[in-house]
Image (cartoon, rainbow, N blue to C red):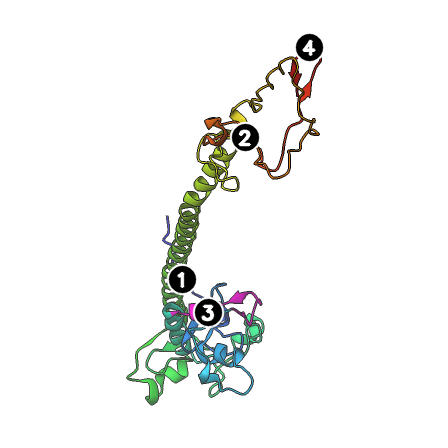
Amino acid sequence: MAAVGPRTGPGAGAEALALAAELQGEATCSICLELFREPVSVECGHSFCRACIARCWERPGTRATAVSYTLSFSLPCPQCREPARPSQLRPNRQLAAVATLLRRFSLPAGAPGEHGPPEAVAAGCAQHGEPLKLYCQDDGRAICVVCDRAREHRAHAVLPLDEAVQEAKELLESRLKVLKKDLEDYEAFRSTEEKESKELLVRMATPRLKSDVTFLQEKLSGDPGPDPDLGLTGPSPRHHAATPPAVTPPAATPPGHHAPAATPPGCHAPGTPRPLPPRPCRHAPGHVTCPPARCLPVSLCPSGHWAL
């Protein structure tokens, strides 16, 4: 079985240049339309030159260099308009290395997609008109066979263009793998932080909820305790049966004596103290008593009995 290696032939150079142009488009800043310089990544995943993102987030009346990267509020991403915090900008070193490597190819500058089809990219040498099939590592640009034989490149390290592109592709893939792993680690870290924050909030709220539930249970099922409005320190009055005050019936009048004039119920003779039965339970703690100004009327029956 034949080994699979880099393509060779007339179309290899055109394909290599097309791949290089595609890689250059991926390493081009969407703001300045040039290869990245000091690229930084925002929270949504897009990358920009540090100076470009600073100009986009520049406030009116301030310079671009005055943008504070410690701000906690969010600003829109210049590419997708998703909220991004300036304090979360991270240097993208892998993308910076790829941009530096692609800059050595010296491809024409322009926005992604402006390089045209592979036939237009694979233009001939501007000096000799020959196809660009070689890559000068010292000068960092593609050259033709005639340029390779010239005195200018005679002592330079020259590789086939497709081989140089293959090396750049492998380096780019390795950098992308590292970048992908860093992104996965960041997502895992952020997920862990969010989970721990939620658990902390639950732990802080649990004791307060338990206290509220206990308070409500005591109010619904237990004795509410003494009522401070009545000044009672004993058991609640509702647990005791109401006891009417005892009234002693008047003694029978002997024959031949006239009873004093009857006093209307609830009244007493002027100048005489109000008679109160000497019962100690009248002021016993824990019992509800009637106010002193209130009297109970007593009715006397002809048979000598009395009733309230």
Point out which mark residue 176 bears: 1
User: What residue lies at 45% left-to-right and 66% top-to-bottom?
Assistant: 9
* Res. 42 in view: yes
- For the residue labelled by badge 3, is the local secondary structure a helix, a strand or a loop? loop
**Disc 3 or disc 2, which is closer to the eye?**
2
Query: Type of residue at label 4?
Result: Ser
Give above or below for 224 relative to 208.
above
Quick one: 25 or 155, which is closer to the camera?
25
Q: Quadrant of the C terminus?
A: top right
Q: CA distance from mark 3 to mark 1?
A: 29 Å
Q: Give, as a single range, the part of the protein colored magenta.
A: 74-92
All told, the count of numbered labels is 4
- Which element type, helix, strand or loop, lies under badge 4? loop
Residue 112 lies within the magenta run: no
Residue 96 x %, y %: 39, 73
Q: Amino acid at mark 2?
A: Leu
Q: Secondary structure at mark 2?
A: loop
Asked if the residue at tag 2 contacts the one at tag 4, i.e. Cβ–Cβ closer than 8 Å, the answer is no
- Pointer 3 or 1: first along the chain: 3
